[in-house]
């Protein structure tokens, strides 16, 4: 941990304490605070306590997130609101609380957890996808605004887009080709996040190549959602130019919580005719 003091915030007091105890046993300095990050009031209250006890925070990792998985019509309004309060609004409250001291000190790093679901629409995850797209927009715009305001400012922004990490967030995940696109162990994901932060990446996926693959596919292919049944990767893909394909190539449909999302990382080459 390179000598840093870790401050863990979580709504789950027991798990948070376990994490901090583990860090303590390993010889690291760590503090646990109970906080519902969707509450602006709590975020500001705990931020003040941290400043008094530990000092100014120089790295914030906005990690808290929830992922209810069912068809849009089965979500109720409270659940949709909760997804946005935790997955999106919490990021605003954390920025409000911690960015000013980073700007004053000209030193800081904000890391935010988006998702590959922030790059593609996925069935049964409509509010979650929308929340993860929002995180990417927030991070990109925030970084751009600060960069335009002061080119010398040394406050950095890194957005992380994992596919599936085996933390339990994604209930009963399954993938068709695990050797091609398996689930990432939590420890590996954590080390990828730290690597991305230390090398000042704007945005990375976990596994690493997925973001590039997504950008390449979306820039190389015109999209047409109506061309094939089921849903697709980001979209059903039809080559914008060159020969048309009539192949339906399913790379790796995944399922979550016993439901087939029937969409993720399905690359479907459909005929243009
Ligand atoms: N696990 C995956 O496959 C995966 C994939 C893509 C993106 N992500 C994103 O990564 C982040 C971390 O996910 P994870 O897999 O570690 O999930 P997790 O459920 O294991 O951990 C999330 C943590 O957030 C805490 N939390 C939830 N609501 C909170 C609140 N209101 N205030 C404070 N803490 C709260 C939970 O108690 C938990 O400790 C999330 O934002 C998630 O959307 C995860």
Image (tube, helix red, strand yellow):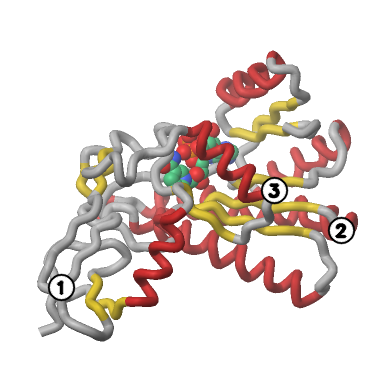
On residue 106, the disc is 2
- Name the mark nearer the viewer: 2 or 3: 3
Q: Would residue 77 be found to the left or right of residue 114 on screen?
A: left
Sequence-first tag of 3 and 1: 3
Q: Residues within 10 Å of mark 3 (few under 14, many from 20)?
A: few
Q: Position of residue 81 (x, y in %)?
A: 46, 54
**Quick one: SS at disc 1?**
loop
User: Residue at coordinates 44% horizontally, 55% vertically from top-left?
Assistant: 209
Dot 1 beta carbon under 8 Å from ligand 1: no
Q: Residues within 10 Å of mark 2 (few under 14, many from 20)?
A: few
Sequence-first tag of 2 and 3: 2
Q: Position of residue 152 (x, y in %)?
A: 84, 69
On the rendered image, what quadrant is the N terminus found in? top right
**Is residue 26 at least partly visible in the picture?**
yes
Residue that numbered label 3 is attached to: 198
Residue that numbered label 1 is attached to: 270
**Quick one: SS at disc 2?**
loop
Q: Would residue 228 be found to the left or right of residue 81 on screen?
A: left
């Amino acid at each position: 941990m390179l000598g840093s003091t870790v401050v863990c915030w979580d709504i789950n007091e027991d798990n948070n304490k376990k994490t901090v105890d583990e860090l303590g046993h390993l010889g690291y300095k760590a503090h646990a605070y109970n906080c519902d990050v969707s509450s602006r009031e709590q975020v500001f209250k705990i931020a003040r306590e941290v400043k008094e006890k530990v000092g100014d925070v120089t790295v914030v990792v906005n990690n808290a997130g929830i992922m209810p998985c069912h068809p849009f019509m089965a979500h109720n309004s409270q659940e949709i609101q909760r997804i946005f309060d935790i997955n999106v609004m919490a990021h605003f409250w954390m920025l409000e609380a911690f960015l000013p001291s980073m700007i004053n000190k000209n030193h800081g790093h904000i890391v935010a957890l988006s998702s590959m679901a922030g790059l593609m629409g996925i069935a049964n995850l409509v509010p979650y996808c929308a929340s993860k797209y929002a995180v990417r927009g927030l991070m990109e715009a925030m970084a751009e605004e600060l960069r335009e305001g002061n080119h010398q400012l040394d406050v950095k922004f890194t957005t992380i887009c994992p596919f599936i990490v085996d933390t339990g967030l994604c209930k009963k995940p399954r993938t068709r080709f695990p050797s091609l696109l398996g689930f990432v162990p939590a420890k590996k994901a954590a080390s990828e996040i730290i690597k991305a932060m230390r090398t000042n990446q704007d945005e990375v996926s976990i596994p690493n190549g997925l973001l590039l693959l997504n950008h390449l596919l979306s820039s190389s292919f015109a999209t047409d959602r109506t061309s094939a049944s089921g849903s697709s990767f980001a979209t059903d893909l039809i080559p914008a130019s060159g020969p048309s394909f009539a192949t339906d190539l399913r790379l790796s449909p995944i399922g979550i919580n016993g439901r087939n999302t029937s969409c993720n990382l399905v690359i479907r080459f459909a005929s243009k005719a």
